[in-house]
Amino acid sequence: MELYNTLSKRIEEFVPENGVVKMYTCGPTVYHYAHIGNLRTYLFEDVLEKSLRYLGYPVKRCMNITDVGHLENDSDDGEDKMLKGAKREGKTVWEIAEHYTNTFFKDCEKLNIQKPEIVEKATDHVAEYIQMIQALEAKGYTYFAEGNVYFDVSKITGYFELSGKKEEDLKVAVREGVSVDQNKKSPFDFVLWFTKSKFEHQAMKWESPWGVGYPGWHIECSAIALKYLGERVDIHCGGVDNIFPHHTNEIAQAESYLGHKWVDFWCHGEHLNDQSGKMSKSKGEFLTVSLLEEKGYNPLCYRYFCLGSHYRNQLVFSYESLEMASKAYEKLINRIKEMRSIEEEGKTDPERVEVYRRKFKEALANDLNTSNALTVLYEVLKDETMSNHEKLNLVDSFDEVLSLSLTEEVNEEKITIGEQMVMLINAGEEKEELLALVDLRMKAKQEKDFSRADALREKIEALGFLIKDGRDQILVSRK
Ligand code: AMP
Ligand code: ZN
């Protein structure tokens, strides 16, 4: 496989160090819902992992859950994101972390993003951060100022290699909209351990040799990666915004700790932007998977939309382009459904099947060219020399990577109750019971009897379904 390496700024042949690919992906900060931009990055990482497996590389993948230490600004400035979430919702930080970790994985499931083999919470590894910081301290890479432990960037060389930017340009980036921490000897120094000097009201805090406090965000990923993947990582991923300062700081601390090179390939996914520019959780429309569902879109349309462009290209989200992707996806699914209904056995041409399989693999091996991989899928469907049986086998096989549920039976039914459109997805045997409950709940809401409406929602959930009130329709789908 050939992959673009942010470190060398070139496409290089990827060879894992020890047969098994050790892959680390930075996980979500669980203070709010993930927006579909965040999910584009997880989708890219999912496709990368599945492509590696499809091409025959075994993969061991680890991801963290950032439930402490990530401040509003990546350069140690602003409020702790978790604390902000807790204040917003009047809950504890622990409740916020649990809730948004669950919703993150539910969103991933809806997008057919597979949960990595190893998922570890930042708050479960405080002892590891302390050990790593102490080792860095003993080697002379840190200093202590006003209660915080800082990594001293002047002690290393090559700090700017990953970002490929000039020191002066990065200084401007660090300064932008941020009050630089006066304790720092250099604006690039970063916090390994905060004590209460940063926030009096920090809820998540632990004893440490430097006082009661909490870890910086960067140390979390490095220590977790070291614990679960060992001293060498083959691929470390994230979104492009992670290149600086997060991954730059990760290299600084991990390589200083280890005394040797740590990560072979750094792979970064470009951003999804909205039409006004940067996607945000606080300004404009907060684009979540649930919002797309409420508007009547199957989340897999979004997956299809992302697969159509290269992970290293910026992608602009608009409802017009999602609508186009949704139509194309629906057409694709229907075409495959039709093929299944007239599936004939017999006639096989193993060579032809192999040609397509090879073309599909070549597309993936070419720095994850998913849009070419989709083109190969369409070529297969169009090929009149193959039987439907052969085609379906290939579609099934390609779907191991594409994960578009291409051959899965999805039963969607639109039903109107009075004036209201109700979309039932895979209702199965519970259909009549569900419709009766939906009807009763609608009536309860009309009568403004909200506690009864809530009780009916709970009954629907107890049957194993979720109900969502969209603008144009009520959506009932299996959990
Ligand atoms: P966070 O939960 O803020 O730590 O971000 C989770 C992931 O989403 C990180 O890997 C970011 O690089 C990535 N990310 C943030 N914004 C976007 C965006 N607009 N498009 C794609 N990925 C993003
Ligand atoms: Zn990280």
Image: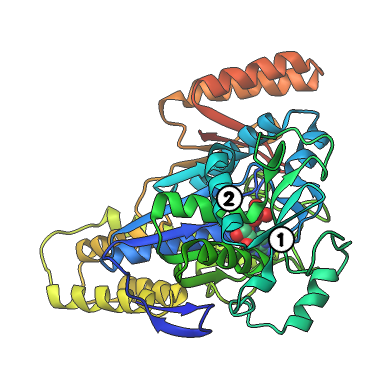
Of badges 1 and 2, nearer the viewer stands: 2
Q: Amino acid at mark 2?
A: Gln
Residue placed under numbered mark 2 in the picture: 134
Q: Residue at x 42, y 60 (%)?
A: 23
Q: Earlier in the sequence, mark 1 or mark 2?
A: 2
Q: Residue at x 54, y 74 (%)?
A: 309
Q: Position of residue 179 (x, y in %)?
A: 89, 61
Q: Which mark is residue 462?
A: none
Q: Is residue 182 above or below residue 474?
A: below
Q: Amino acid at mark 1?
A: Phe
Q: Which mark is residue 190?
A: 1
Residue 35 in view: no
**Element type at mark 1:** strand
Q: Residue at x 67, y 43 (%)?
A: 68
**Element type at mark 2:** helix
Distance between the alpha carbons at the discs numbered 1 and 2: 15 Å
Horizontally, residue 16 falls left or right of residue 425, namely left
Q: How is the image coloured?
A: rainbow
Q: Position of residue 312 (x, y in %)?
A: 56, 76
Q: Quadrant of ligand 1?
A: bottom right
Horizontally, residue 225 falls left or right of residue 317, namely left
Nearer to us in this view, 287 or 123: 123
Residue 109 in view: yes
Q: Residue at x 25, y 73 (%)?
A: 357
Other residues around mark 1 within 10 Å, as few (<14) / some (14–19) / many (≥20)? many
Q: Position of residue 232 (x, y in %)?
A: 40, 64
Horizontally, residue 166 falls left or right of residue 256, namely right
Q: Position of residue 430 (x, y in %)?
A: 46, 24
- Say which quarter of the image contains residue 229: bottom left
Q: Is residue 197 above or below residue 98?
A: below
The quadrant of the picture occupied by the N terminus is bottom left
